[in-house]
Amino acid sequence: MKQGGQDSAGTEPTGGPAGQVTIRFLDVGQGDAILIQSPEGKTALIDGGRSSDRMRDYIRDLNLDKLDLMIASHADADHIAGLVPAATLKPRVFINNGLGGTTQTWERLVKNLQDAGSTFTKASNQTVNLGSVKLRVIAPPPGMGDGQNENSVGVALQFGTFRALMTGDSETPETEGWLAQERDDLRGPFQMYKSIHHGAANGDSAAWLAYVRPENVVISVGASNTYGHPTKTALNLYKQAGARVYRTDRQGTVTVQGSGDGTYTITTDR
């Protein structure tokens, strides 16, 4: 399936950096994994899904031999298990929310990253340059307590006038905290947007979507999952926001190629 970029982006070509950024919302079942590749060949992986074997398959099939940046939005297993084998690609920098995890999966990830010589960094609203692609790391707002979901790390990608936003499993208190900050880096529109928490009812809200203004929403979700994701509540919100919806349980991996003038194409596995 292919969606024409000019019509989808809603912008006239105005120039920008050369080449294209590629974002793959990988089909990892009930979980998240997002691979970003810059025109210069720099790579970043945001989350890794819950299956180490599936991530190994992607590493092989996509001929990945290195990672420049790895980000864990938070330490839940459906986001970090696949990062364990990906850590053998020796990412230069690893960013997380600073809370860490308490599971054996987390411990294996930390060990692999230490063995790889990766630099551990806490999300602090820093900007990471992935070649000509800028990744703004969105730290959780103050007062989120010690829960993993509401301390999810967000990433706002910018390549010229093409933008994408991913915020892990953020829940309503976190998005409300970000809205209170009136952050320009979260102010839409975004051509691509990853559904919060696989389309759970306690993730996206009308106020949040009105602020980030997504053109296309990707729901990373497992087929026939036991959580009832995506919920009718979330799907109705995306419809009301006027966004196109892509689902990994129905369409497989969703691949976006964005140009610096804001145009883009979207392809799916099925």
Image (spheres, rainbow, N blue to C red):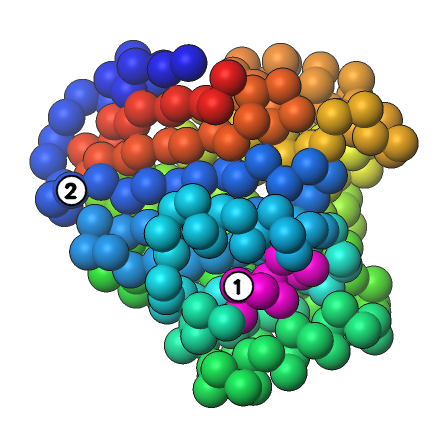
Q: Residues within 10 Å of mark 2 (few under 14, many from 20)?
A: some
Residue 197 image point, x, y percent = 72, 41
213, 29: nearer the viewer: 29
Sequence-wise first label, 2 or 1: 2
What residue is drawn where x is 11% and y is 44%? 18
Q: Is residue 88 above or below residue 220?
A: below
Q: Main secondary structure of the magenta part?
A: helix
* Residue 83 lies in the magenta stretch: yes
Residue 122 is at least partly visible in this image: yes
What residue is drawn where x is 78% and y is 34%? 200
Q: Residues within 10 Å of mark 1 (few under 14, many from 20)?
A: many
Disc 2 element: loop
Of the residues tagged 2 and 1, which is closer to the observer? 1
Q: Is residue 81 above or below residue 188?
A: below
213, 62: nearer the viewer: 62
Q: Is residue 132 above or below residue 117?
A: above
What residue is drawn where x is 30% and y is 64%? 129
Residue 198 image point, x, y percent = 71, 36
Q: Amino acid at mark 2?
A: Gly
Residue 109 position by quadrant: bottom right
Q: Which residue is mark 1?
A: 86
Q: Is residue 245 above or below residue 135?
A: above
Disc 1 element: helix
Q: Which residue is mark 2?
A: 19
What residue is drawn where x is 56% and y is 20%? 251
Number of callouts in the render? 2
Residue 167 is at least partly visible in this image: no
Q: Which residues are magenta?
A: 80-87
How far separated are the C-alphas under marks 2 and 1? 26 Å
